[in-house]
Amino acid sequence: MRLSSIILPVSVLLIAAAASIATAIKAVDVIEERSESAVKTALILSGDEWATVAVDGLQVILNGTALSESDRFRALNAASSVVDAARVIDRMEVADSANVPPPRFSIEILRDETGISLIGLVPESTRRDVIAQDIAALAQGAEVTDMLDTAAYPPPEGWEQALAFGVEALKRLPKSKISIAADRVSVTATAESTTQKRRLEESLAERAPDGMELALRITAPRPVITPFTLRFLIDEKGPRFDACAADSEEARRLILDAARQAGFSGGGNCTIGLGAPSPRWGEAVAAGIRALHELGGGSLTFSDADVSLVAPAETPRAHLDEVAARLETALPAVFSLHAILPEPVNVDGSGKDSGEGPPEFVATRSPEGLVQLRGRLTDERLRAVVNSYAQARFGADNIDSAMRLDPELPEGWSLRVLAGLEALSRLASGSIVIQPDFAQLRGKTGNPDAKAEISRILSEKLGAGANFTIDVTYEKRLDPVANLPTPEECVASINAVLKENKITFAPGSATIEPTANRTLDKIAGLLKNCEDVQMEIAGHTDSQGREEMNLNLSQARAEAVLTALMARRVLTSGLVAKGYGEARPIADNKTEEGREANRRIEFTLIAPKGEDAAADGTGNGSDGENGSTGSEKEETAVSASPSSQPAEQSSPPAGEDRNGTMPVSSLPPKPRPETSDEQN
């Protein structure tokens, strides 16, 4: 009895002790888990994922190799912010700085109408002040957010060139994201039109530094295509598109997949636009391409809902009817199919009456722009219309007309002739041959989209079921976009215009005289091919009158020229108006001839800092009397002004009056300063 009475209390005590121990162990585990989780989270938030965490009871042990002492200290502070600092055991090491690889330097720049943001890491040697000046000038008062960090490492090879190129690209792209690294610059932007998109792509690709990868993703609004046209051919040259339009990415994929199955191996240049006659456009075109492939050759033309399937002349009629029947079943209800088995075509192309073959109208355009019109027209009225139309398209002095009248020509002949002339106007040189049932266009062009444009013209104007061929070659040397003038050529051509007739102003004011309108028109025309060129329009006066008055007058006149160019629909984002007053004479102000020379307007090229200005007769990049006009921007201004010569060699531009010529700016015009009656 005594033994059992002792065992029971002892058992209770043992059980209670075991429960207490288990509870304590569990509590320690919970504390360890919570401490480890909290410290890991704090390290992630501080950017110190390199540090590892181990927990032993209440102790939190930090391990890992920090890149620098500051990184180790930051990790230690992060851990101490969530647990008692006395519990943190520091077992971290600091890497030997000689063995630490440099970080990857990069900048991402975002620009839109609200402002500009810069995010990234740059070397300490990078001129942050220069970048800030350039960006602030671009922002034009909008907010600039600078979130750049620096690191004490030497810049990698190519960094400075890539950075300069990225900032230069930003100047041309008001809505863009530009990512800059030493070996790669990525540009994502929007353009106002497909033409501007091409200009930007050509310009940026040309200016990209050697050895640097350039990734361009410039988009333009979807064009409205009317008529919505696609033309696919299979002949001795192989499968190819003369025109390709799609209404969506999926439709383009369907079309190109069908074309590749038919043997097409070219690129996927199929314009996505608006205006498709059916949401099933892609399916319809793919079915048409498969039908053409089954025929083994010929042409397929979609013009809105009209579909023309032209088989090779040797195709058996039964085979064409079979293929056409299957295609007609596959096409959505909105489409109308015209299956054509043409007669063998004999193209004379001379426009002469040989007495054999069908009647012809032939127009040829030479590389010099001369156009010969030969062949037949129905009556005198049509001859007058054709001559007038040709003169409007090609210039009255370029037409050589020798056409004879034939009242027996088929109905619709006049429309076919005028459509042919319109198509020929899309070529730099070539010929169009019009027959009652056939048209042939051949030639050269500098427009990469010319085939598509011509296909739309002929398919729309010649009507459903039209049979025509287009043999057009694109030559880059003829492309006005690919062969835009260089910046130096832009400045030189503008100043050549100013040399002939300077921009004149009313005495003592910034009011441009009407006699200068023609000069401004010429300059505006030249600037439309120089939209991406950064230029300064510099205004200068002689030394008569007060110095401050002359400075204000030259600035006001410069801005007046800018305003006049803006009124002529010139893109002025690359133009800056700057007045220099009497500070930069090019001749002796003591003589009337010298003062006349000093009253002038000059266009100068603004080149990024570090680039040498042209000094070969197209400009002057040295400081001094005739030197840089862009020092205030830490840039070099390259002048191509014909008057930028030493004073003893200068003469005022012909036709220049006492009121001088002025520059242009992207800034809004300032209030006109008060002036005296002195002529500057």
Image (tube, grey):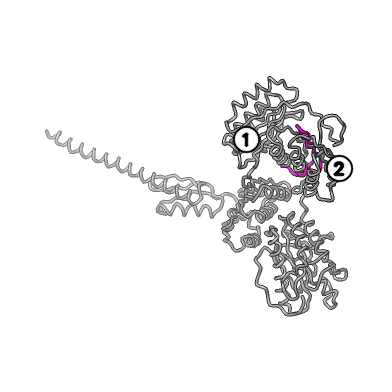
Indicate the amino acid at tag 2: Ala
Could you tell me residue 34's position as x and y percent?
Answer: 38, 46
Which is more toward the observer, 247 or 157? Answer: 247
- Split into 4 quadrants, where in the image is the N terminus? top left
Q: Secondary structure at mark 1?
A: loop
- Residue 660 x %, y %: 78, 71
Residue 593 versus residue 226 in the image, above or below: below
Kind of residue at disc 1: Ala
User: Does the rendering let one see residue 148?
Assistant: no
Residue nearest the viewer, comparing 529 with 61? 529
The residue lying toward the viewer, choosing from 444 and 425, is 425
Q: Is residue 435 left or right of residue 59?
A: right
Disc with the residue nearer the chain's start (2 vs 1) = 1
Left or right placement of residue 19 versus residue 470 in this view: left
| Residue extent of the magenta highlight | 423-449
Image position, residue 676 (x, y; %): 72, 80
- Residue 347: where, in percent of width, then height? 82, 32
279 within the magenta span: no
Confirm or deny contact between disc 2 and disc 1 (CB under 8 A): no
Locate residue 361 relative to residue 449 in the image: left or right: right
10 Å neighbourhood of mark 2: few (<14), some, or many (≥20)? few
Q: At numbered mark 2, what does the secondary structure look like: helix, strand or loop?
A: strand
The answer to whether residue 559 is seen in the rendering is yes
Residue pointed to by mark 2: 402
Location of mark 1 (residue): 305
The question of residue 439 being in magenta is answered with yes
Position of the C terminus, as image quadrant, is bottom right
At 60% from the left and 37% from the top, the residue drawn is 277
Q: Residue at x 68, y 51 (%)?
A: 162
Tell which residue pokes out farthest to the left in this image: 1
